[in-house]
Image (cartoon, grey):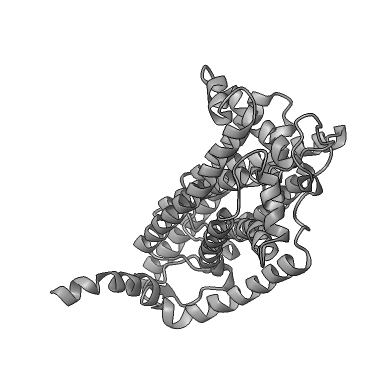
Amino acid sequence: MRINHKLGPLKVLNQHLIAYPTPTNLSYMYNWGSLAGIVLGSQIVTGILLAMHYVGHVDHAFQSVQHLMTDVPSGMILRYAHANGASLFFTVVYMHIFRGIYYSSGNQPREMVWITGVVILLLMIITAFIGYVLPWGQMSFWGATVITSLATVIPVVGKSVVHWLWGGFSIDHPTLNRFYSFHYTLPFVLAGLSIFHIAALHQYGSTNPLGVNTQTSTIPFGTYFATKDALGLFYLLLAFSILVFFYPEWLGHPDNLIPANPYATPQHIVPEWYFLWVYAILRSIPNKAMGVVAIALTFASLIGLPFLSSVHIGSPKFRVISERLFWVFVADVFLLTWVGAQEIMPATVLLGQVCTVVLFIYLLGVYPFVSWLESTLYLQGVRKNTHLSTARSA
Protein backbone atom coordinates (compact mmCIF):
# COMPACT_ATOMS: atom_id res chain seq x y z
CA MET A 1 0.00 0.00 0.00
CA ARG A 2 2.83 2.38 0.91
CA ILE A 3 4.67 1.61 -2.34
CA ASN A 4 1.55 2.27 -4.41
CA HIS A 5 1.05 5.55 -2.59
CA LYS A 6 4.61 6.65 -3.35
CA LEU A 7 4.30 5.65 -6.98
CA GLY A 8 1.02 7.54 -7.39
CA PRO A 9 2.54 10.66 -9.04
CA LEU A 10 4.65 8.47 -11.32
CA LYS A 11 1.55 6.58 -12.40
CA VAL A 12 -0.14 9.88 -13.28
CA LEU A 13 2.89 10.98 -15.33
CA ASN A 14 3.00 7.63 -17.08
CA GLN A 15 -0.71 7.78 -17.85
CA HIS A 16 -0.64 11.30 -19.30
CA LEU A 17 2.86 11.50 -20.83
CA ILE A 18 4.03 8.01 -21.71
CA ALA A 19 1.05 5.71 -22.19
CA TYR A 20 -1.43 8.41 -23.25
CA PRO A 21 -3.31 7.00 -26.30
CA THR A 22 -2.60 9.21 -29.30
CA PRO A 23 -4.06 9.00 -32.83
CA THR A 24 -1.58 7.35 -35.17
CA ASN A 25 -1.87 9.97 -37.92
CA LEU A 26 -0.84 13.15 -36.05
CA SER A 27 1.23 15.53 -38.17
CA TYR A 28 3.94 17.97 -37.13
CA MET A 29 1.27 20.67 -36.83
CA TYR A 30 0.32 19.00 -33.55
CA ASN A 31 3.76 19.77 -32.06
CA TRP A 32 2.90 23.34 -31.11
CA GLY A 33 1.16 22.46 -27.84
CA SER A 34 4.12 20.62 -26.35
CA LEU A 35 6.52 23.27 -27.64
CA ALA A 36 4.44 25.96 -25.92
CA GLY A 37 4.83 24.14 -22.61
CA ILE A 38 8.60 23.89 -23.05
CA VAL A 39 8.93 27.60 -23.90
CA LEU A 40 6.78 28.52 -20.88
CA GLY A 41 9.12 26.53 -18.66
CA SER A 42 12.10 28.32 -20.20
CA GLN A 43 10.49 31.72 -19.60
CA ILE A 44 9.85 30.90 -15.94
CA VAL A 45 13.46 29.79 -15.38
CA THR A 46 15.03 32.78 -17.15
CA GLY A 47 12.57 35.12 -15.43
CA ILE A 48 13.58 33.87 -11.98
CA LEU A 49 17.26 34.36 -12.85
CA LEU A 50 16.60 37.88 -14.15
CA ALA A 51 14.70 38.79 -10.99
CA MET A 52 17.91 38.19 -9.00
CA HIS A 53 19.49 41.22 -10.68
CA TYR A 54 16.50 43.48 -11.43
CA VAL A 55 15.72 46.48 -9.22
CA GLY A 56 12.03 47.44 -9.22
CA HIS A 57 12.49 51.19 -8.77
CA VAL A 58 11.97 53.91 -11.38
CA ASP A 59 15.39 55.44 -10.56
CA HIS A 60 17.27 52.16 -10.87
CA ALA A 61 15.27 49.81 -13.13
CA PHE A 62 16.88 50.89 -16.42
CA GLN A 63 20.36 50.92 -14.88
CA SER A 64 19.84 47.46 -13.37
CA VAL A 65 19.01 46.07 -16.81
CA GLN A 66 22.13 47.72 -18.26
CA HIS A 67 24.18 46.34 -15.37
CA LEU A 68 22.85 42.87 -16.13
CA MET A 69 23.80 43.27 -19.79
CA THR A 70 27.33 44.56 -19.24
CA ASP A 71 28.59 43.37 -15.84
CA VAL A 72 26.89 40.05 -15.05
CA PRO A 73 28.57 36.99 -16.66
CA SER A 74 26.29 35.73 -19.46
CA GLY A 75 23.77 38.38 -18.41
CA MET A 76 23.30 39.58 -21.96
CA ILE A 77 22.44 36.06 -23.11
CA LEU A 78 20.04 35.66 -20.19
CA ARG A 79 18.22 38.91 -20.90
CA TYR A 80 17.96 38.30 -24.64
CA ALA A 81 16.85 34.71 -24.05
CA HIS A 82 13.96 35.97 -21.93
CA ALA A 83 13.02 38.82 -24.28
CA ASN A 84 13.15 36.74 -27.45
CA GLY A 85 11.62 33.81 -25.59
CA ALA A 86 8.47 35.89 -25.21
CA SER A 87 8.33 36.37 -28.98
CA LEU A 88 8.92 32.67 -29.50
CA PHE A 89 6.21 31.83 -26.96
CA PHE A 90 3.63 33.92 -28.81
CA THR A 91 4.72 32.51 -32.17
CA VAL A 92 4.21 28.95 -30.95
CA VAL A 93 0.88 29.75 -29.28
CA TYR A 94 -0.46 31.61 -32.33
CA MET A 95 0.45 28.64 -34.52
CA HIS A 96 -1.26 26.37 -31.99
CA ILE A 97 -4.42 28.50 -32.16
CA PHE A 98 -4.42 28.66 -35.96
CA ARG A 99 -4.04 24.88 -36.09
CA GLY A 100 -6.95 24.51 -33.66
CA ILE A 101 -9.21 26.67 -35.83
CA TYR A 102 -8.05 24.94 -39.02
CA TYR A 103 -8.85 21.46 -37.73
CA SER A 104 -11.82 22.53 -35.54
CA SER A 105 -10.00 21.01 -32.57
CA GLY A 106 -12.03 22.99 -30.05
CA ASN A 107 -15.44 21.82 -31.21
CA GLN A 108 -17.73 20.04 -28.79
CA PRO A 109 -17.14 18.02 -26.67
CA ARG A 110 -13.68 19.65 -26.41
CA GLU A 111 -14.99 23.19 -25.88
CA MET A 112 -13.33 23.43 -22.45
CA VAL A 113 -9.96 22.81 -24.09
CA TRP A 114 -10.54 25.74 -26.43
CA ILE A 115 -11.92 28.09 -23.76
CA THR A 116 -8.97 27.48 -21.42
CA GLY A 117 -6.66 28.06 -24.38
CA VAL A 118 -8.18 31.50 -25.06
CA VAL A 119 -7.94 32.37 -21.35
CA ILE A 120 -4.27 31.36 -21.44
CA LEU A 121 -3.76 33.67 -24.44
CA LEU A 122 -5.34 36.58 -22.55
CA LEU A 123 -3.12 35.97 -19.53
CA MET A 124 -0.10 35.73 -21.83
CA ILE A 125 -0.92 39.14 -23.30
CA ILE A 126 -1.27 40.70 -19.84
CA THR A 127 1.92 39.05 -18.58
CA ALA A 128 3.95 40.08 -21.64
CA PHE A 129 2.63 43.66 -21.52
CA ILE A 130 3.58 44.25 -17.88
CA GLY A 131 6.91 42.54 -18.54
CA TYR A 132 7.57 44.97 -21.39
CA VAL A 133 7.16 47.83 -18.91
CA LEU A 134 9.81 46.56 -16.48
CA PRO A 135 12.98 47.72 -18.38
CA TRP A 136 11.59 51.26 -17.93
CA GLY A 137 12.64 52.49 -21.35
CA GLN A 138 10.85 55.09 -23.43
CA MET A 139 8.52 52.62 -25.12
CA SER A 140 7.92 50.85 -21.81
CA PHE A 141 6.77 54.04 -20.10
CA TRP A 142 4.61 55.40 -22.89
CA GLY A 143 3.18 52.00 -23.76
CA ALA A 144 2.07 51.64 -20.14
CA THR A 145 0.59 55.13 -20.25
CA VAL A 146 -1.49 54.40 -23.35
CA ILE A 147 -2.67 50.91 -22.41
CA THR A 148 -3.53 51.53 -18.74
CA SER A 149 -5.55 54.62 -19.71
CA LEU A 150 -7.91 52.33 -21.63
CA ALA A 151 -9.40 51.29 -18.29
CA THR A 152 -11.05 54.72 -18.06
CA VAL A 153 -13.76 53.51 -20.45
CA ILE A 154 -15.11 51.15 -17.77
CA PRO A 155 -18.37 52.69 -16.52
CA VAL A 156 -18.40 54.21 -13.03
CA VAL A 157 -15.17 52.59 -11.73
CA GLY A 158 -12.89 53.26 -14.72
CA LYS A 159 -10.86 56.09 -13.17
CA SER A 160 -10.58 54.22 -9.87
CA VAL A 161 -9.19 51.18 -11.71
CA VAL A 162 -6.59 53.34 -13.46
CA HIS A 163 -5.54 54.97 -10.19
CA TRP A 164 -5.22 51.53 -8.62
CA LEU A 165 -3.07 50.31 -11.51
CA TRP A 166 -0.88 53.39 -11.25
CA GLY A 167 -0.78 53.36 -7.45
CA GLY A 168 -1.39 57.10 -7.59
CA PHE A 169 -2.31 59.82 -10.06
CA SER A 170 0.43 59.09 -12.59
CA ILE A 171 2.71 56.27 -13.67
CA ASP A 172 5.56 56.15 -11.19
CA HIS A 173 7.37 53.92 -8.72
CA PRO A 174 4.19 52.24 -7.32
CA THR A 175 3.14 51.34 -10.89
CA LEU A 176 6.46 49.64 -11.59
CA ASN A 177 6.30 47.74 -8.30
CA ARG A 178 2.79 46.46 -9.04
CA PHE A 179 3.75 45.39 -12.54
CA TYR A 180 6.88 43.66 -11.24
CA SER A 181 4.81 41.72 -8.70
CA PHE A 182 2.22 40.71 -11.30
CA HIS A 183 4.84 39.73 -13.86
CA TYR A 184 6.54 37.46 -11.37
CA THR A 185 3.27 35.79 -10.30
CA LEU A 186 1.28 35.35 -13.51
CA PRO A 187 3.64 32.83 -15.22
CA PHE A 188 2.93 30.37 -12.40
CA VAL A 189 -0.80 30.95 -12.94
CA LEU A 190 -0.20 30.24 -16.63
CA ALA A 191 1.56 26.99 -15.71
CA GLY A 192 -1.40 25.92 -13.58
CA LEU A 193 -3.88 26.78 -16.35
CA SER A 194 -1.75 24.84 -18.82
CA ILE A 195 -2.03 21.74 -16.65
CA PHE A 196 -5.80 22.19 -16.55
CA HIS A 197 -5.75 22.69 -20.33
CA ILE A 198 -3.93 19.37 -20.80
CA ALA A 199 -6.31 17.60 -18.38
CA ALA A 200 -9.30 18.88 -20.37
CA LEU A 201 -7.66 17.64 -23.58
CA HIS A 202 -6.97 14.17 -22.17
CA GLN A 203 -10.56 13.81 -21.03
CA TYR A 204 -11.78 13.23 -24.60
CA GLY A 205 -8.46 12.62 -26.38
CA SER A 206 -6.72 14.47 -29.17
CA THR A 207 -8.19 15.21 -32.56
CA ASN A 208 -6.31 14.32 -35.74
CA PRO A 209 -5.79 15.69 -39.27
CA LEU A 210 -8.60 13.54 -40.70
CA GLY A 211 -11.08 14.97 -38.21
CA VAL A 212 -12.80 11.63 -37.62
CA ASN A 213 -12.90 9.40 -34.55
CA THR A 214 -9.72 7.33 -34.35
CA GLN A 215 -9.95 6.21 -30.72
CA THR A 216 -9.68 2.60 -31.86
CA SER A 217 -6.42 3.38 -33.73
CA THR A 218 -4.07 4.87 -31.15
CA ILE A 219 -0.49 4.36 -29.98
CA PRO A 220 1.29 5.43 -26.76
CA PHE A 221 2.45 9.05 -26.93
CA GLY A 222 5.78 8.65 -25.14
CA THR A 223 6.91 5.66 -27.16
CA TYR A 224 6.29 7.07 -30.62
CA PHE A 225 5.52 10.79 -30.62
CA ALA A 226 8.16 11.97 -28.14
CA THR A 227 10.74 11.62 -30.94
CA LYS A 228 8.60 13.68 -33.31
CA ASP A 229 8.17 16.41 -30.70
CA ALA A 230 11.92 16.32 -29.99
CA LEU A 231 12.65 17.02 -33.66
CA GLY A 232 10.30 20.01 -33.54
CA LEU A 233 12.08 21.18 -30.39
CA PHE A 234 15.47 21.04 -32.15
CA TYR A 235 14.18 23.27 -34.96
CA LEU A 236 12.71 25.64 -32.37
CA LEU A 237 16.03 25.80 -30.51
CA LEU A 238 17.80 26.54 -33.78
CA ALA A 239 15.51 29.52 -34.47
CA PHE A 240 15.83 30.61 -30.85
CA SER A 241 19.64 30.47 -30.97
CA ILE A 242 19.78 32.50 -34.19
CA LEU A 243 17.61 35.20 -32.60
CA VAL A 244 19.52 35.35 -29.30
CA PHE A 245 23.07 35.21 -30.67
CA PHE A 246 22.78 36.95 -34.06
CA TYR A 247 19.66 39.17 -34.06
CA PRO A 248 18.86 39.85 -30.38
CA GLU A 249 17.26 43.27 -30.99
CA TRP A 250 15.55 42.41 -34.27
CA LEU A 251 12.11 42.05 -32.67
CA GLY A 252 12.56 44.90 -30.18
CA HIS A 253 12.10 48.65 -30.50
CA PRO A 254 15.15 50.97 -30.43
CA ASP A 255 13.32 53.56 -28.30
CA ASN A 256 13.28 51.10 -25.43
CA LEU A 257 17.07 51.40 -25.24
CA ILE A 258 16.53 54.98 -24.04
CA PRO A 259 15.66 55.62 -20.36
CA ALA A 260 12.03 56.53 -19.72
CA ASN A 261 11.36 60.26 -20.00
CA PRO A 262 7.82 61.43 -19.13
CA TYR A 263 8.55 64.80 -20.79
CA ALA A 264 9.47 63.43 -24.24
CA THR A 265 6.79 61.55 -26.14
CA PRO A 266 8.08 59.10 -28.80
CA GLN A 267 7.13 59.97 -32.35
CA HIS A 268 5.42 56.60 -32.90
CA ILE A 269 4.24 54.53 -29.91
CA VAL A 270 3.96 50.84 -30.81
CA PRO A 271 3.74 47.70 -28.69
CA GLU A 272 5.66 44.49 -29.24
CA TRP A 273 4.94 42.72 -32.54
CA TYR A 274 2.70 40.08 -30.94
CA PHE A 275 0.27 42.81 -29.77
CA LEU A 276 0.14 44.65 -33.09
CA TRP A 277 -3.02 42.98 -34.43
CA VAL A 278 -4.90 43.96 -31.26
CA TYR A 279 -3.40 47.45 -31.37
CA ALA A 280 -4.50 47.84 -35.01
CA ILE A 281 -8.10 47.02 -34.05
CA LEU A 282 -7.96 49.52 -31.18
CA ARG A 283 -6.65 52.45 -33.18
CA SER A 284 -8.79 51.78 -36.27
CA ILE A 285 -11.85 52.86 -34.26
CA PRO A 286 -11.83 56.61 -33.48
CA ASN A 287 -13.82 56.23 -30.26
CA LYS A 288 -11.64 54.82 -27.46
CA ALA A 289 -14.55 53.13 -25.67
CA MET A 290 -15.74 51.43 -28.86
CA GLY A 291 -12.18 50.32 -29.57
CA VAL A 292 -11.99 48.58 -26.19
CA VAL A 293 -15.41 47.02 -26.83
CA ALA A 294 -14.15 45.75 -30.21
CA ILE A 295 -11.15 44.08 -28.56
CA ALA A 296 -13.40 42.51 -25.89
CA LEU A 297 -15.75 41.31 -28.63
CA THR A 298 -12.82 39.76 -30.50
CA PHE A 299 -11.84 37.59 -27.56
CA ALA A 300 -15.48 36.84 -26.72
CA SER A 301 -15.89 35.64 -30.31
CA LEU A 302 -12.83 33.42 -29.98
CA ILE A 303 -14.24 31.90 -26.79
CA GLY A 304 -17.57 31.31 -28.52
CA LEU A 305 -16.15 29.56 -31.61
CA PRO A 306 -16.91 26.01 -30.34
CA PHE A 307 -20.55 27.00 -29.83
CA LEU A 308 -20.81 28.76 -33.21
CA SER A 309 -19.51 25.76 -35.13
CA SER A 310 -21.58 22.66 -35.88
CA VAL A 311 -19.27 20.71 -38.19
CA HIS A 312 -19.24 16.91 -37.93
CA ILE A 313 -15.88 16.41 -39.68
CA GLY A 314 -12.91 18.37 -38.39
CA SER A 315 -10.58 18.07 -41.34
CA PRO A 316 -10.80 21.04 -43.76
CA LYS A 317 -9.70 18.73 -46.58
CA PHE A 318 -13.33 17.55 -46.65
CA ARG A 319 -14.61 21.13 -46.27
CA VAL A 320 -13.18 23.11 -49.17
CA ILE A 321 -15.12 26.32 -48.46
CA SER A 322 -13.95 26.45 -44.85
CA GLU A 323 -10.34 25.88 -45.86
CA ARG A 324 -10.32 28.75 -48.37
CA LEU A 325 -12.00 31.15 -45.94
CA PHE A 326 -9.62 30.13 -43.17
CA TRP A 327 -6.65 31.32 -45.19
CA VAL A 328 -8.44 34.62 -45.80
CA PHE A 329 -8.77 34.93 -42.02
CA VAL A 330 -5.05 34.18 -41.49
CA ALA A 331 -4.08 36.75 -44.14
CA ASP A 332 -6.34 39.29 -42.45
CA VAL A 333 -4.64 38.77 -39.07
CA PHE A 334 -1.20 39.14 -40.68
CA LEU A 335 -2.34 42.32 -42.40
CA LEU A 336 -3.66 43.70 -39.10
CA THR A 337 -0.24 42.98 -37.56
CA TRP A 338 1.46 44.92 -40.35
CA VAL A 339 -0.98 47.83 -40.05
CA GLY A 340 -0.40 48.04 -36.30
CA ALA A 341 3.31 48.70 -36.90
CA GLN A 342 2.70 51.56 -39.36
CA GLU A 343 2.31 55.23 -38.54
CA ILE A 344 -1.22 56.57 -38.22
CA MET A 345 -2.24 57.92 -41.62
CA PRO A 346 -5.59 57.99 -43.42
CA ALA A 347 -4.60 55.01 -45.58
CA THR A 348 -3.44 52.82 -42.66
CA VAL A 349 -6.49 53.75 -40.57
CA LEU A 350 -8.81 52.83 -43.44
CA LEU A 351 -6.97 49.56 -44.05
CA GLY A 352 -7.18 48.75 -40.33
CA GLN A 353 -10.92 49.39 -40.36
CA VAL A 354 -11.42 47.13 -43.37
CA CYS A 355 -9.36 44.35 -41.80
CA THR A 356 -11.27 44.71 -38.52
CA VAL A 357 -14.59 44.37 -40.33
CA VAL A 358 -13.31 41.30 -42.20
CA LEU A 359 -12.18 39.77 -38.90
CA PHE A 360 -15.61 40.14 -37.31
CA ILE A 361 -17.40 38.98 -40.45
CA TYR A 362 -15.35 35.78 -40.36
CA LEU A 363 -15.70 35.12 -36.62
CA LEU A 364 -19.37 36.02 -36.22
CA GLY A 365 -20.81 35.49 -39.69
CA VAL A 366 -18.82 33.31 -42.04
CA TYR A 367 -17.55 30.76 -39.49
CA PRO A 368 -20.95 29.74 -38.06
CA PHE A 369 -22.77 30.00 -41.43
CA VAL A 370 -20.26 27.85 -43.30
CA SER A 371 -20.31 25.35 -40.43
CA TRP A 372 -24.12 25.16 -40.67
CA LEU A 373 -24.01 24.84 -44.47
CA GLU A 374 -21.40 22.08 -44.42
CA SER A 375 -23.20 20.23 -41.62
CA THR A 376 -26.44 20.39 -43.60
CA LEU A 377 -24.77 19.04 -46.73
CA TYR A 378 -23.06 16.35 -44.67
CA LEU A 379 -26.31 15.20 -43.06
CA GLN A 380 -28.06 15.17 -46.44
CA GLY A 381 -25.26 12.99 -47.82
CA VAL A 382 -25.56 10.62 -44.86
CA ARG A 383 -29.33 10.31 -45.34
CA LYS A 384 -28.89 9.74 -49.07
CA ASN A 385 -26.32 7.00 -48.51
CA THR A 386 -28.57 5.43 -45.87
CA HIS A 387 -31.53 5.35 -48.27
CA LEU A 388 -29.36 3.84 -51.01
CA SER A 389 -28.04 1.17 -48.67
CA THR A 390 -31.56 0.37 -47.50
CA ALA A 391 -32.85 0.13 -51.06
CA ARG A 392 -30.02 -2.17 -52.13
CA SER A 393 -30.49 -4.47 -49.12
CA ALA A 394 -34.21 -4.63 -49.81
Q: Is residue 391 visible?
A: yes
Quadrant in the picture for residue 18? bottom left
- Is residue 214 left or right of 2 when viewed as pictured? right
In the rendered view, does 239 fall on the left or right side of 160?
A: right
Q: Is residue 298 left or right of residue 188?
A: right
Query: Residue 69's spot in the image, x, y percent?
Result: 71, 59
Tell me the residue at 15%/74% (across/down): 2
Residue found 74% across the figure and 25% down from its top = 286
Q: Position of residue 363 (x, y in %)?
A: 60, 43
Relative to 23, residue 258 above or below? above
Residue most extreme to the left:
1
Compared to residue 181, the image places residue 28 above or below, namely below
Q: Which quadrant is the N terminus positioned in?
A: bottom left
Q: How many marks?
A: 0
Position of residue 129 measured from the top left corner of the image (x, y, whole percent): 62, 44
Q: Spot the residue most to the front.
A: 71
Which quadrant, please, contains the C terminus? bottom left
Q: Quadrant of residue 137?
A: top right
Residue 107 seen anywhere in this rendered image of the structure: no
Q: Position of residue 261 (x, y in %)?
A: 77, 35
